[in-house]
Image (tube, helix red, strand yellow):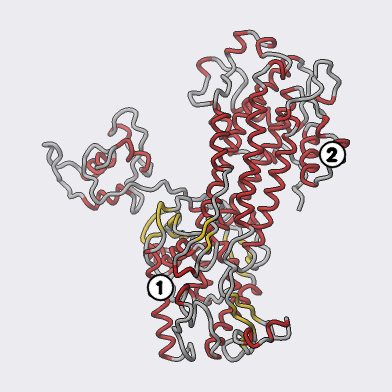
Amino acid sequence: MYDHRTFLPSLHLADHNPENFPSGWPVRLDFRRKNSIMHRLLDKLPNGMPLRGRPHVDRRALAALIALGYLGLGAGVEAESRYEPIAPTKAATTITLTGHDLTVEQVVAVARDGAQVRLSPEARQRSLDAYGLLLEAQLEGVTMYGFNRNYGSGRQEETLVGDPMSAANKTKLEERQLSRFRAAVEDGYGPEVDSEAIVRAMMVVRANSMTYEFASPQLTQMLLDLLNKRITPVVQSRGTPGEADLAQLTDLGGTMVGVGDAYFGGVRMSAAQALKRAGLQPLRPFGGDDYALDSSNAYAVGMAALLVADARHALEWSDLIYAMDLDGMNSSVTPLTRPVQISRPQAWLNWEADRVLQMLKGSYLFDDDPQRILQDPESLRASAIRQGSAWLAWGHLRDSVLAQMNSSDHNPAVVVGMSPQDSWELATPYLMKYYVKGGKYSRGKQGYIVSNANWDPYPLANDIEAFTIALGNMNAAVAQRIERFGSAFITGVSPSDILTAAELSAVPHGGQGYSPDTFLQEMGGLAVPVAPSGNSGDNGIADLQSSSRIKVTRAAAAVDLTLDLLGADLLNATFWMDLRKHQNPARQFGAPPEAAWSAFRKVLPFQLSEAQRPSVPMGGVATAFLRKNSASQFVPEGRQPPQ
C-alpha cells in the first residue's frame, strides 16, 4: 500500500488542475507523458469504475487519487524515479573523439549539454584494425582470453575453433553474442542511476576508449548513435567492484539490442521503443562485442570526469570567498606575499597564494590600519595552504582521469602493428604464442593480443580518495574561519559596535548556528578512506577490487557538501564586508570580491523589511547562488591551474 508521505516525492510533476486537489498539496500530475505513472494507472483502470458509492468516476480522477495515496490500490504500480534529464543546450556542437585527447570539458559538453559525437577517421580505422586483428588471430589459432577461451575461472576452456567467418562459426558467434547482450539486464543491482548525465558520461568515455578494442563496426556505430539520438539506457548503480564496470556497461548493451528500459529524450520507455522512435535497428553484435563493450571502468571514469569539473567549480569559489573573508576580517595579507612564498617554493601553493593576492589587489587591506592585528588565526593564515593542497590533489585527479579515459583499460590488450622486433620479450617462445602474423582479415597487419590487468583502475582510484581527503582538510579551515568571525577578540569589533539594534534586526543573516560544524562532521565521514579489500570469488581469479564506484560517489558528495559549507561562508563574508563598508564607506575590497559581493546582494540584500524576508533558509539561498554562478565570471583574468 502506498502512503502519500513517501509516495508524493517520487511523482513526475506536470500539467495539473489545482482545483481538483486539496489545498497545500505540492503536486502536478502528468497525464501527457508516455509511460508516466498516470498513463500506467490509466491503462489499469476501466471507465465507469465506481468509487465510494459514486458511479462512473472518470479514470483520470481515479488515477490522480491513487497517485495521491488516497486509495490502497498500489499493486503493480511503481512511483516514478527522480530522474534528472539533461538540458541539451549544445546539441548543435559536435565533439570529435580521437581516443587520445578527450578533455573533461568535452565530457561535460556531451554528458550534460547534449553535444554530438563522431570518431576521427584515424580512430575509426584503429577500431577497424583491432577488430580485423581479432578475426585474423582466430583464423591463425592464437589463444585469446574472452573470445576463443572463456572468462574468469573458465579461461582454459576453448569456445571456438577455426575460421570465425565460416558458416558454422559465424552463426555461432551471432547467436552467442545476441544471447549475451539480451541477458545483460539481469546483471547489476539498484537503485537505478537517476542522472542522465552520469550515464552519458560513461557512454562517451567508452566510445573514446573503445577505439582501442576489437569492437565490431556496428557496435562502435551504435554507441555513437545512442549518444547522438539521446537514447540513454536505464543503468543500475551498483554491482561493480571497480575492476571493470561490467554490470553498468552490460545495461548499455541491453539497450543496444532492444532489451530493458531506456530514456529517449528524457522520457522513459522500453529500449525497443526508444530505438524505433529514433529510427535505429537493434544491434546485431558479433565477434567479441560483449567483452569489447563491458571490459572497462567507463562508469567510474565518467563520474570522475564530472567530479573534476564540479570540483574545479567549488575550488574556484573557495578561493574567491577566502578573499572575501580576508576583506571581512580586516586581515593581514602577509602570508600571501612574495617573501613568504619564495621561502616555500611549492608550485601549487605559490600559485594559490598569488591567485588570491591578485583578487585582493586594490583592497583596503593594503592600506595601513592601526586596528589591524599582526597575525590572523591559522584558519585564515593557512587557508591558502589548505586550498592550494586541495588544488594539488585536484591536479593529480585531473591528470589521472585524462590518462584513464584516453587509453585502453581492456583485457586483453589489442595492439596492431607491433612485431617481435619491437621488444626483446616479444620474440621469446611464450610471447610468440600471442603474435598475429597478419592476413586477409587484418589486411595483412600484424600485432599482439595479450592478457593483462589494465582494468585495475589505479592510480585513479587512489587519486579520487586523495582528493576527498584534501577537500576535507580544506573544509576544516573553512569551517574554523567561519567560527572565528563570532569572536570580537579576532575581528576587533562586534556588529553591534557598527550597526544599531534596529539595523541589525533588518539583516536576514541570523548567524550560521551549528551548520558549519555539522557539515564538517559529515565531511569527516566522507574523508575516511574505503578499506582495501579483495574478492575470493571465481576460484580466486578475480580477487581484487578497487571500490572506485564507492570512492567517486563519496567524492562527489564531498564536493556537494563543500558548496553547502561555502554557502555558509559566503553569508558570513558578505555580512562582514557590509560591516566594514559601514565602518568606512571609502573602503575597497578588490575587483573580484567586490563584484561577487555586489552580485550576491542583488539576490539577498543586506537589509530587508519583515515583509521582504525570504521564507527559506539563508544557507540554501547562498548555496543556490554558488551552484548557479561560476566564480570565474568575477575573476576574468584568474590564472589557470598548473599543468
Camera-side mark, 2 or 1 = 2
Residue marked by disc 1: 180
Q: Quadrant of residue 419?
A: bottom right
Residue 535, position as x, y percentages in the image = 48, 61
Looking at the image, which is closer to me, 441 or 299? 299
Residue 558, position as x, y percentages in the image = 57, 42
In the structure shown, which secondary structural element does the residue marked by tag 2 occupy? helix
Q: Amino acid at mark 2?
A: Gln
Q: Residue at x 67, y 18 (%)?
A: 487
Residue 513, position as x, y percentages in the image = 55, 23
In this rendering, is residue 268 above or below 284? above
Q: Quadrant of residue 254?
A: bottom left
Sequence order check, earlier mark of 2 and 1: 1
Residue marked by disc 2: 341
Q: Amino acid at mark 1?
A: Arg
From this viewpoint, is residue 539 visible? yes
In the structure shown, which secondary structural element does the residue marked by tag 1 occupy? helix
Residue 489, position as x, y percentages in the image = 71, 16
Answer whether labels 2 and 1 touch (C-beta < 8 Å). no
Crowd class of label 1 (few under 14; some 14 to 19; many from 20; radius 10 Å)? some
